[in-house]
Amino acid sequence: MTMAKRRLPPLAVSVLVLGVTAAGSGAVAATWPGPPRTSSPQVAGAKIAPPPAWVETPQHSTWLAYSSYCWSHSAGTAACVDFLPARSRTDLPVLTAHAGTILRFHLQFGISKLAVTYPEKSSQRLKPARVASWLPLRSGRVTLTARSATGQQSRYLLRLTLAPPISQAAAAPGPLERGKWVCAPQRAQRACAGPVTIGVRYLYVLRTHCGILNAYFAGHLWRANPALTDGSGNPPRGWENPEALGTMRLIRSNLAEFRQNNKLVARFTPAPTHWKAVTCD
């Protein structure tokens, strides 16, 4: 096997700005747009490169930019290619979507490991699949790292900007602002006071300090079904504490769902009229 390692300049990838609606992200899309209609990116000067990857919302799709990789062909040739640091790249595709939008990554090889990473190294594992869904909760430069079933590795890049949901006037709160976003009967935000539309995801901050027990949503008190705790008055492992930033949607009139990410999900049913919200110190 022959192997070469070289540093290449950024790809000349066209910048494409995509806009999506909160309504489109709330329900399962009847159809997805499929591969981009533009030509796939190429690695200039390299004879070996991983298959290109792309990302789609329920309305649009775009190619991802290549980043560093180590890849080989069945003929026995291989190459490890380094790109400029992502912060120095000016060619990254720009994806703008409303908060609550589900993104789908598409890869053209068997996957053993898959993760998305932000610049400060916070990472989220995704289900290793050729088509992988992700619910992003904040803006930033995103790296998609994929390890193939045969042990090869490739990275792809995009610049993600989350706009406020159409139904809300403010962008996602920072960690120190989340307490002010927790819904209560006196709060006027659409997610708190309603009315809400079935299937639409609303940016939402869920109180998790005592465990996931209840939530005020769309003008009503809801009870977690089932309640989620670690048995010691805390949320289960992986949940943010004391508040979790995510999305809340009404699945049907008597069932609501909160998602912190693709894996951490809590469901709620209407609380009985005599039931009071559970609080703790």
Image: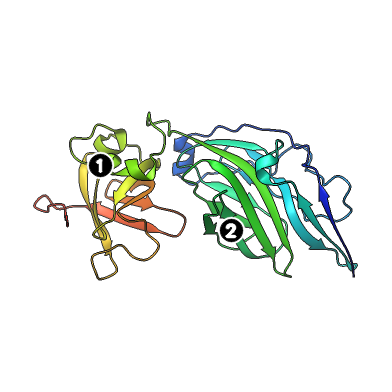
Which disc, if any, is residue 174? none
Which disc, if any, is residue 115? 2
The tag earlier along the polypeptide, 2 or 1, is: 2
Q: Where is residue 114 shown, x and y percent of the image?
A: 61, 60
Amino acid beneath label 2: Ala
Q: Where is residue 40 shown, x and y percent of the image?
A: 78, 43
Q: Is residue 51 left or right of residue 157?
A: right
Q: How far, Cα to Cα, is label 2 from label 1?
A: 32 Å
Q: Where is residue 216 shown, x and y percent of the image?
A: 23, 45
Q: Please rate how many residues cluster around mark 2, counting C-alpha atoms within 10 Å: few if below 14, some from 14 to 19, many from 20.
A: some
Q: Vertically, is 98 above or below 149? A: above
Image-quadrant location for residue 141: top right
Which disc, if any, is residue 183? 1
Label 1 SS: loop
Label 2 SS: strand
Looking at this view, is 79 or 5 the one in front? Answer: 5
Quadrant of image for the C terminus: bottom left
Q: Is residue 222 visible?
A: yes
Q: Is residue 25 left or right of residue 31?
A: left
Q: Is residue 112 left or right of residue 99?
A: right
- Indicate the colouring scheme: rainbow
Q: Residue at x 74, y 46 (%)?
A: 84
Q: Where is residue 167 shown, x and y percent of the image?
A: 38, 31
Amino acid beneath label 1: Cys
Q: Determine the residue located farthest toward the top in the rendered image.
A: 169
Q: Vertically, is 112 above or below 241? A: below
Q: Residue at x 45, y 36 (%)?
A: 22
Question: Mark 2 and 1 residues: CB-CB less than 8 Å, in contact?
Answer: no
Q: Residue at x 41, y 59 (%)?
A: 264
